[in-house]
Amino acid sequence: MQFSRDVPTNETAYAMPIRRCPTKGDLVGIVTSHQILGTYTHYYHSRTVPCDEPEPCDACQDGYSKRYHVYVGSFIPATNEHVILELTAAASDSFRNYQKRLGTMRGCWFKIHRPSGRPNGRIHAQCKHADQTKIDLPTEPNLIRALCHIWNKPLPNPETTKPNNRIRDQHSDYAADDCAVAELFATAANPTPVPPEPKNGKPNQ
Ligand SMILES: [Zn+2]
């Protein structure tokens, strides 16, 4: 038997919680990902699940509308947590503009809230450059791996399991036939265009 004062990093690296904008109050954080990652999801059986598009998944076949969601690694100083921030496509505008201007999202300070105070109310996001000399940001998370872990999906491609910046370099190389998730995540290759939200979507978030 062996005791250790350090937890092996591979035991925790992919167990990141998903965090959404709170109904009331602000959520303040700093982005740890270089790029956003997006995919279509359904709110199905009381949880958000990825859609297997272009193949119809179970939720599609049951008539549930799909909605585009954007994911980005974020450090939350107030709670000292490293989380996966989930945003609606519309709420990701400020983040994508930041990425376009600076070439990376890492180090972007953000504050998000819902002005209406309603659970699915529109999200208002403020983004600005953070002084990284004052913050020791966690390493960029492997969002694909973390999300596949949460959603219990196979990894799209061995290349994408490499940590850190490899995601940015490899995402255009996804073999779409490896698994449906590869197809979904391939949309991250060009993060700028985000599809409009469906008009008659069921509440999802
Ligand atoms: Zn679907």
Image (cartoon, rainbow, N blue to C red):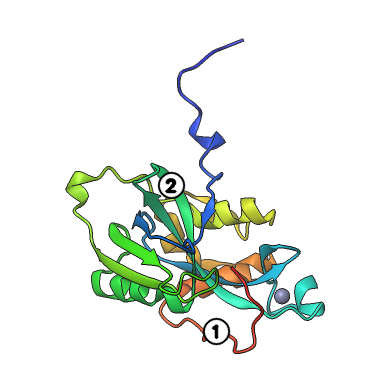
Residue 65 visible in the current orientation: yes
The residue depicted at 54 percent of the width and 13 percent of the height is 3
Residue 26 is situated, as x and y percent measured from the top left of the image, at 38, 60
Q: Ligand 1 closer than 8 Å to the CB at disc 2? A: no
In the image, 186 versus 121, the foreground residue is: 121
Q: CA distance from mark 2 to mark 1?
A: 28 Å
User: Which residue is under mark 2?
Assistant: 82
* Residue pictured at 48% horizontal, 77% vertical: 89
Q: Nearer the viewer, residue 19 or 141?
A: 19
Look at label 1 and name its amino acid.
Glu
Name the image quarter holding residue 74: bottom left
Which quadrant, please, contains the C terminus? bottom right
**Earlier residue among tags 2 and 1:** 2
In which quadrant is the N terminus drawn?
Answer: top right
Compared with 8, 52 (above or below) is below
Q: For the residue carrying disc 2, how many other residues have a C-alpha within 10 Å: few (<14), some (14-19), or many (20+)? A: many
Q: Is residue 177 visible?
A: no
| Amino acid type at mark 2 | His
Tell me residue 159's x, y (percent). 54, 56
Residue named by callout 1: 197
Image position of 132 with respect to 119: above or below: above
